[in-house]
Image (cartoon, rainbow, N blue to C red):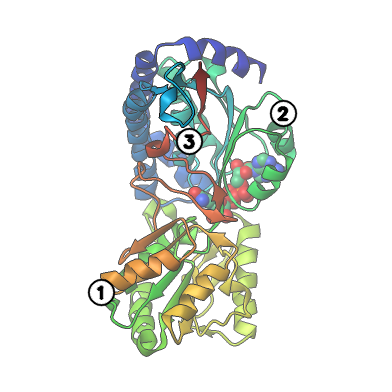
Amino acid sequence: MESSRMAQKSWAKTPLWKRAEMLHKAGAILKDHKKPIAECLVKEIAKPATDALTEVVRSGDFVSYCAEEGVRILGKGEFLVSDSFPGNDRTKYCLTSKVPLGVVLAIPPFNYPVNLAVSKIAPALIAGNSLVLKPPTQGAVAALHMVHCFHMAGFPKGLISCVTGKGSEIGDFLTMHPGINCISFTGGDTGISISKKAGMIPLQMELGGKDACIVLDDADLDLAASCIVKGGFSYSGQRCTAVKVVLVVESVADALVKQVNQKVEKLSVGAPEDDCDITPVVTEFSSNFIEGLVMDAKQKGATLCQEYRREGNLIWPLLLDNVRSDMRIAWEEPFGPVLPVIRINSVEEGIRHCNQSNFGLQGCVFTKDINRAIQISDAMEIGTVQINSAPARGPDHFPFQGLKDSGIGSQEIANLDRNIDDMHDKLAL
Ligand SMILES: NC(=O)c1ccc[n+]([C@@H]2O[C@H](COP(=O)([O-])OP(=O)(O)OC[C@H]3O[C@@H](n4cnc5c(N)ncnc54)[C@H](O)[C@@H]3O)[C@@H](O)[C@H]2O)c1
């Protein structure tokens, strides 16, 4: 904490163009080291090999993009005159510019230990902050390699510190430390408890989701089924933006379920090294939790479209049809390759289900009627709605944020000028 505080002071005085130059260098080095870092992701979090490489490359690109946008956004200030407000003559002038917050604590989750770390690190650094990174337990080795790339680019060590350890053991020390000036967290409900414990500092929270996919009777069912399978089962469903509940109008439900099932049968199940679609989920605890949700739904009468199968932490993809709202899986986030389908009698019923959730991250609507799609999107109380496309974060420069228990603030570079995580407005009167 002390070295971070000291390093930040001189970093804030480093010219903006120089900060950008170093970030560009770090982005390039990160991409040069994509293979060893991706190998860590494969071993540590069972991410399929190709996706692991994509995560590192996209992270390198994001660092460069941040440097570029940062120079533009932070290079500007504002000039105000007093007579634009009633009752004032032109006797006062106001100059504003952005200044850094200080030490930013960055806590990413296990599912994107590199990308979701970099998406906190790069905006914070370009804005003149220092970083204390607490990587997830699973993914810590990949994160250490990634931080090493920043050090190789010439960033002083104290500026980016990586503190490994279990969140349950070192989390409180870090999040409640008086030397922290901002917390940028991505993860589950832990974020809610952190927000209650943290002091009076800016918080940015990207938390869980229960992304609903509403399918109307006029939808292109083949497209909807492809997006549901991609959205629901990529990285074995361990994505905040995974489709986590399908709400389909009864008249097309049989046809949709049939098409989704046909695609589910084709998913490969096995090792991440073999680039299988479905790989083991992250922990035994997680596997047991997913199994609990499946068994609860089964007991209460859901239709299991495939046989439930599990070997260790490897869970075969499963579609659960005829799920009802008294089942846990209708509301809880499995973070695994199991996807509930709720049949609805009207679009309003689908919107109601979506809005009753305590989450409000993303969702999607499938219909050929774009006017209806926009009206439904507007009615869904969530951060982002995808029309005729699966929920997803990105491209990485798009703003991304959750409502309700899904988060506070938006992390993206497009919002750098409005984003209190990385800087605040300084007034010079
Ligand atoms: N909204 C988003 O952008 C987004 C993106 C990815 C994942 N997620 C969410 O993340 C969750 C899955 O990730 P996870 O299992 O790693 O989440 P998690 O909340 O268990 O852990 C997230 C991070 O918090 C740390 N942590 C744990 N206890 C802590 C404590 N007391 N103090 C400080 N840090 C602590 C963990 O070590 C990890 O680094 C899902 O709920 C998913 O929806 C959200």
* Cβ–Cβ under 8 Å for marks 2 and 1: no
Percent x, y of residue 251: 37, 89
C-alpha distance separating marks 2 and 1: 52 Å
Q: Earlier in the sequence, mark 2 or mark 1?
A: 2
SS at mark 2 in the image: loop
Residue highlighted by disc 3: 419
Percent x, y of residue 11: 49, 13
**Mark 3 or mark 1, whichever is nearer to me:** 3
Q: Amino acid at mark 2?
A: His
Q: Amino acid at mark 1?
A: Lys
In the image, the residue with mark 1 has its CB under 8 Å from the nearest atom of ligand 1: no
Q: Earlier in the sequence, mark 3 or mark 1?
A: 1
Between 42 and 337, the residue placed more toward the observer is 337
In the image, the residue with mark 3 has its CB under 8 Å from the nearest atom of ligand 1: no
Kindly identify which numbered label has been placed on residue 389: none
Density class for disc 3 (Cα within 10 Å; few <14, some 14-19, many ≥20) is some
268 is higher (above) or lower (below) than 240: below
C-alpha distance separating marks 3 and 2: 22 Å
User: Is 333 situated left or right of 91 in this image?
Assistant: right
**Mark 2 or mark 1, whichever is nearer to me:** 1
Please report the residue visible at 72 percent of the width from the left and 28 percent of the height from the top.
177
Residue highlighted by disc 2: 177
SS at mark 3 in the image: loop
Residue highlighted by disc 1: 368
**Mark 3 or mark 2, whichever is nearer to me:** 3
SS at mark 1 in the image: loop
Q: Quadrant of residue 164?
A: top right
Q: Amino acid at mark 3?
A: Asn
Question: Is residue 190 shown to the viewer in this render?
Answer: yes
Question: Is residue 306 shown to the viewer in this render?
Answer: no
187 is higher (above) or lower (below) than 154: below
Q: Quadrant of residue 55?
A: top left
